[in-house]
């Protein structure tokens, strides 16, 4: 059994296993709970994206299949976590911080691996690219979680996390990854790489906005977060996940299908 067929079999089973409280959550979803509605919509969109990416592995060259499978893993992992985050929010009204960061600690490194995979598909990408991007994601995420969970000052966590993000931006704009994409990638891959890079720049900038709204703007006189802070933080984070998981995967799909069609036409 191929990896793709195995994943296609596991996805419905895994998603169904993640839905024990769906009926209860649905009964408690209020028409004016826009945060809860956003959780619900995005969990469905992530599930649909997983099926799409796995199905599309059939129409691309072999060197692109791993990239599409990783895109499917990103949306699959996020979908499962969104089912649980949705239930936490709808049933308690609290921010599902732990589930959120468990999701990010798995999916964000996978998104960075996509840069390595797309470069490996066009040439000999060094392992240094992979490790630098992976370390950058950990520097970005771990302090952010510690700040939101109360282990360190929220400002300290925010600043260190931003430094990790800037390190990633340097690598994909001016580091070895950027140089390889500029020198060796065909036009379709260069276009996809450039758009992926802008997603990491502009799309990822949405996360700090949510952090700032949740912990620095919508606070009371004592500096404590408010209901408005939780709502703003979760809506912004949910919007960012749509852009940075689904849209990012679609860019990989575009590069894969474009180059595969070009190579098939040339062979014909």
Image (cartoon, helix red, strand yellow):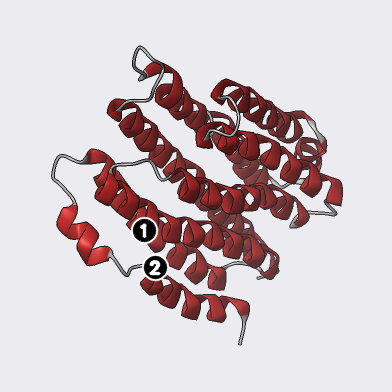
Question: Residue 231's mark?
Answer: none
Q: Name the quadrant of the N terminus.
A: bottom right
What secondary structure is marked by label 1? helix
Q: Which residue is mark 2?
A: 18
**Cα gap from disc 2 to disc 1, whole angstroms:** 7 Å
* x then y, percent, for residue 18: 39, 68
* x then y, percent, for residue 181: 75, 41
Question: Quick check: marks 2 and 1 in contact, CB under 8 Å?
Answer: yes
Q: Which residue is mark 1?
A: 83
Q: Nearer the viewer, residue 197 or 31?
A: 31
Q: Nearer the viewer, residue 40 or 219?
A: 219
Examine the rendering and report whether any part of residue 49 can be seen: no
Q: How many marks?
A: 2
- The answer to whether 240 is drawn above or below residue 107 in the figure is above
* x then y, percent, for residue 127: 85, 51
Within 10 Å of the Cα at label 2, are there few (<14), some (14-19), or many (20+) other Cα atoms? Answer: some
- The answer to whether 267 is drawn above or below residue 239 in the figure is below
Query: Which of the marked residues, 2 or 1, is nearer the chain's N terminus?
Result: 2
């Amino acid at each position: 059994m191929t990896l793709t067929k195995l994943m296609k079999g596991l996805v419905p089973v895994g998603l169904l296993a993640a839905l024990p409280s769906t009926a209860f959550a649905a009964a408690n979803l209020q028409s004016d709970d826009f945060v809860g509605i956003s959780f619900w919509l995005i969990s469905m969109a992530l599930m649909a994206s997983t099926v799409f990416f796995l199905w599309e592995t059939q129409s691309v060259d072999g060197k692109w299949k791993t990239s599409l499978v990783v895109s499917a893993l990103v949306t699959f992992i996020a979908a499962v976590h969104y089912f649980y985050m949705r239930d936490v929010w709808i049933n308690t009204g609290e921010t599902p911080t732990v589930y959120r960061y468990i999701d990010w600690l798995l999916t964000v490194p996978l998104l960075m691996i996509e840069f390595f995979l797309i470069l490996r598909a066009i040439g000999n990408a060094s392992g240094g690219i992979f490790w630098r991007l992976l370390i950058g994601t950990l520097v970005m995420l771990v302090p952010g979680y510690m700040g939101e969970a109360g282990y360190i000052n929220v400002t300290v966590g925010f600043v260190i996390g931003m430094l990790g993000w800037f390190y990633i931006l340097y690598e994909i704009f001016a580091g070895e990854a950027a140089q390889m994409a500029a020198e060796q990638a065909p036009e379709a891959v260069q276009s996809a790489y450039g758009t992926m890079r802008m997603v990491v720049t502009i799309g990822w900038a949405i996360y700090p906005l949510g952090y700032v709204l949740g912990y620095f703007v919508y606070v009371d006189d004592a500096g404590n977060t408010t209901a408005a802070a939780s709502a703003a933080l979760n809506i912004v984070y949910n919007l960012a996940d749509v852009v940075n998981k689904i849209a990012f995967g679609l860019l990989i799909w575009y590069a894969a299908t474009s180059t595969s069609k070009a190579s098939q036409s040339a062979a014909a």
